[in-house]
Image (cartoon, helix red, strand yellow):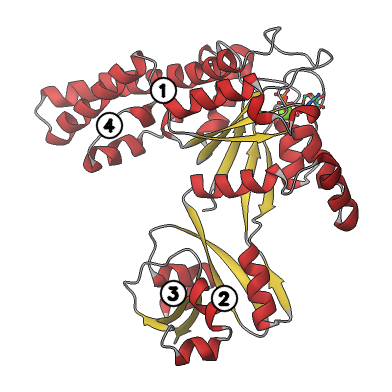
């Protein structure tokens, strides 16, 4: 199943604007809260300079980047965990995503409604996070009631789960997200099974005004978001959703000129896409033949046969070996043959853990 990152935040902070810029999906965005109700799903191509290099090297007929999914979710308001503003429905949309991009309004614009009246990023972040914590607290408390009964009958599994749930409950009651509560590896499995909102990995997106983009490091709101995120070891990406949505509509020279005018080298979107890809625990391997050079997304930690299965189930079923060279070794050698002569192409078997940047040729037999 494809992994998806959810764009989460207060209403009217620029989530759909950002989503459109990333995916060019044309979701509705307007200056009123709860413009989005049903989630919008879009696919985004992963920018990867390595793919361009491999294309130069192999000169294939075509080049295919890899892609992953973003989901644009409705705004969450105070009281959502109690059902406020279709809260339960919106929280259930967050439950379905694998990582959270939390958009925080940092731009000042009196024409754009802010649900609580003033731009206050920390209060906004805390509002959302608290709703997620409260929703989790309810999940955990309900489960705990059931498990306690079983634990009283000395059911071993129930006793172990009870311990995890109690610890979670204590943490959540102190307004700590589940991801900040420490567990053993064994206990982590139990936590995972609960599908809590606050155990999903998170990054913060500071949405600044068009004219604040260059001075973002001196922007007080951005500083505050950075300080907050640091306490959670979370990453912050600074972006102007409005500018990005304008950039996304341009191409080629026009785009370069616009970027130059703004004084930015790389669009913030590329940074965001890469950071989210990491957050989801995704990585890329390549296939590089004369027909096509292609990037493939895999979940970190999988072995060669499963990686082969991403291309075709036959590749997994009939897996023999993976002829593998790292991107760095291949580009250093200059050609596949040169890499082979240098002994850089390895024959990897079914226990090989695929790494980001591997260029692989699968041998299979069905
Ligand atoms: N000035 C300014 N306006 C912005 C920026 N980003 C978004 N907006 C405006 O803010 C309004 C709300 O944007 P949306 O993208 O619809 O916000 P949302 O977070 O998806 O809102 P809901 O779906 O209602 O939760 C729109 O009028 C946008 O044009 C920005 O960086 N600067
Ligand atoms: Mg929206």
Name the spot of residue 240 as percent of width and height, x first: 74, 33
- The residue wearing badge 4 is 182
Question: Does residue 14 appear anywhere in the picture?
Answer: yes
Closer to the camera, 253 or 179? 253
Q: Which mark is residue 287?
A: 2
| Disc nearer the start of the sequence (3/1) | 1
Closer to the camera, 53 or 279? 53
Circle 1 packing at 10 Å, graded few (<14), some (14-19), many (20+), is many
Cα–Cα span, label 2 and label 3: 15 Å
Of circles 1 and 2, which is in front?
A: 2
Cα–Cα span, label 1 and label 2: 42 Å
Name the spot of residue 167 as percent of width and height, x first: 25, 23
Above or below 184: residue 170: above
Q: Can you name the residue that lies furthest to the left here?
A: 154
Of circles 2 and 3, which is in front?
A: 2
- The residue wearing badge 1 is 136
């Amino acid at each position: 199943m494809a992994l998806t990152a959810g764009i989460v935040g207060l209403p009217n902070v620029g989530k759909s604007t950002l989503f459109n810029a990333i995916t060019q999906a044309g979701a509705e965005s307007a200056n009123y809260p709860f413009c989005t109700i049903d989630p919008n799903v879009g696919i985004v191509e992963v920018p990867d300079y390595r793919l361009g290099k491999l294309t130069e090297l192999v000169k294939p007929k075509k080049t295919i980047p890899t892609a992953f999914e973003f989901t644009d979710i409705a705004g969450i308001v105070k009281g959502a965990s109690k059902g406020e503003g279709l809260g339960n429905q919106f929280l259930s949309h967050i439950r379905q995503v694998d990582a959270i991009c939390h958009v925080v309004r940092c731009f000042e614009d009196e024409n754009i409604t802010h649900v609580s009246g003033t731009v206050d990023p920390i209060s906004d972040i805390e509002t959302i996070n608290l709703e997620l914590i409260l929703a989790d607290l309810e999940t955990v408390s309900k489960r705990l009631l059931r498990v306690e009964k079983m634990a009283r009958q000395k059911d071993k599994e129930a006793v172990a789960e009870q311990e995890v749930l109690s610890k979670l409950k204590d943490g959540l009651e102190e307004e700590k997200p589940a991801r900040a509560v420490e567990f053993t590896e064994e206990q982590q499995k139990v936590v995972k099974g609960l599908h809590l909102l606050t155990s999903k990995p998170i990054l913060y997106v500071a949405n600044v005004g068009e004219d604040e983009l260059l001075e973002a490091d001196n922007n007080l709101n951005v500083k505050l978001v950075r300080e907050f995120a640091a306490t959670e070891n979370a990453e912050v990406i600074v972006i102007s959703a409005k500018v990005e949505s304008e950039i996304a509509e341009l191409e080629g020279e026009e785009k370069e000129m616009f970027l130059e005018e703004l004084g930015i080298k790389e669009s913030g979107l590329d940074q965001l896409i890469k950071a989210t890809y990491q957050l989801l625990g995704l990585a890329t391997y390549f296939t590089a033949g004369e027909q096509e050079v292609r990037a493939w997304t895999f979940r970190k930690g999988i072995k060669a046969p499963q990686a082969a299965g991403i291309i075709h189930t036959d590749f997994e079923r009939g897996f023999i070996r993976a002829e593998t060279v790292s991107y760095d070794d291949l580009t250093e050698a200059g050609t596949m043959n040169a890499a082979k002569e240098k002994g850089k192409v390895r024959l990897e078997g079914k226990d090989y853990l695929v790494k980001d940047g591997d260029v692989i040729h699968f041998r299979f037999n069905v």
